[in-house]
Amino acid sequence: MTRLPFTKMHGLGNNYIYVDRLTYTEPLPPYPELAKKVSNQNTGIGSDGLILILPSEIADVKMRIFNSDGSEAKNCGNGLRCVAKYAFEHGLVNKEHFSIETISGKVEAKVFPTDGGVDKVTIDMGEPILERKRIPMTGGKPEETVIQETHIIEGQAYQITGVSMGNPHGIFIVDNIHNIPINELGPELADGHDLFPEGTNVGFVEVISENEIHYRVWERGSGITQACGTGACAAVVASILEGRIHQGELITVHLAGGDLQIEWDSESNHVWMTGAAVTICDGMFFLS
Ligand SMILES: N[C@H](CCC[C@H](N)C(=O)O)C(=O)O
């Protein structure tokens, strides 16, 4: 029986099982299989997925994220804030500003310690990826940006804006966040639709004011979650591309699990995300 030490953490209710592979170096099953095991609400711990904290040759630490269906994601905003909190609180880093490697690139993290603990983290998520072929999306010129493109999905016309934050997001701007076809469009687009050859996270945005939006998400590989950090960044970028809000402004994004502060900076073209990171528990998972 392998006893796997883990920490369960969440960012706005988007919760993952974190395994510190710098400290616990015993052999483990393949990560996709482990992600499905630990994420299972009935026979596992229960979570939106698994996040590994690993050594890095190009950054201070490395993050790999696996959705609850075992698929590997290329980025995770809520996960990055929790990795930053964990790394600082457990002495994996000894500074408040440090770098984290993901499989879509390196980001910069800044923690704001109070009494030795970290409750709030800012991540420089880097530049959004807007070219159709890099999201990736099909259906038009590979280099162009996909803004409010009309597509017929299940017999209904929708306008989609495509943004990647290292992972793909199809964004729909709606009039009322409480009346969205999330259970229809989520499963239809998240995995295996021609428009998104690598699948996509499916986000819905209601613009409240120049500095405030609502955002809800069906995540590729996990379904509806309480929050999605990369999705909230993509939602702000899409709302700006559609002319609803302005670049260079600090936007409050209201998600089901809480709020994030996000800015798509005009000077650097980088997207900055600030929000909470919370430890739920430490534990021991009995791997049979
Ligand atoms: N919840 C994560 C995103 C997971 C992305 C994953 N669902 C995928 O891209 O396959 C976040 O806070 O950004």
Image (spheres, rainbow, N blue to C red):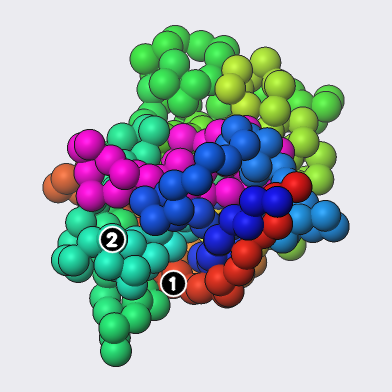
What amino acid is at disc 2?
Leu
Q: Residue at x 62, y 27 (%)?
A: 199
Residue matched to label 2? 92
| Quarter of the rendered structure image containing ligand 1 | top right
Q: Looking at the rendered structure, which numbered label has been put on residue 276? A: 1
Label 1 neighbour load within 10 Å: few <14, some 14-19, many 20+: many
Marks 1 and 2 sit apart, C-alpha to C-alpha, by 20 Å
Q: Nearer the viewer, residue 199 or 44?
A: 44
What secondary structure is found at the residue carrying circle 2?
A: loop
Q: Magenta segment range?
A: 47-76
Q: Nearer the viewer, residue 286 or 31?
A: 286
Which residue of the protein is positioned furthest toward the bottom in this rendering?
Answer: 115
What amino acid is at disc 1?
Ala
Q: Nearer the viewer, residue 62 or 256?
A: 62
Does the stretch in magenta take in 69?
Answer: yes
Does the stretch in magenta take in 137?
Answer: no
Q: Residue at x 62, y 64 (%)?
A: 284
Determine if residue 274 is in view: no
Q: Is mark 1 within 8 Å of ligand 1?
A: no
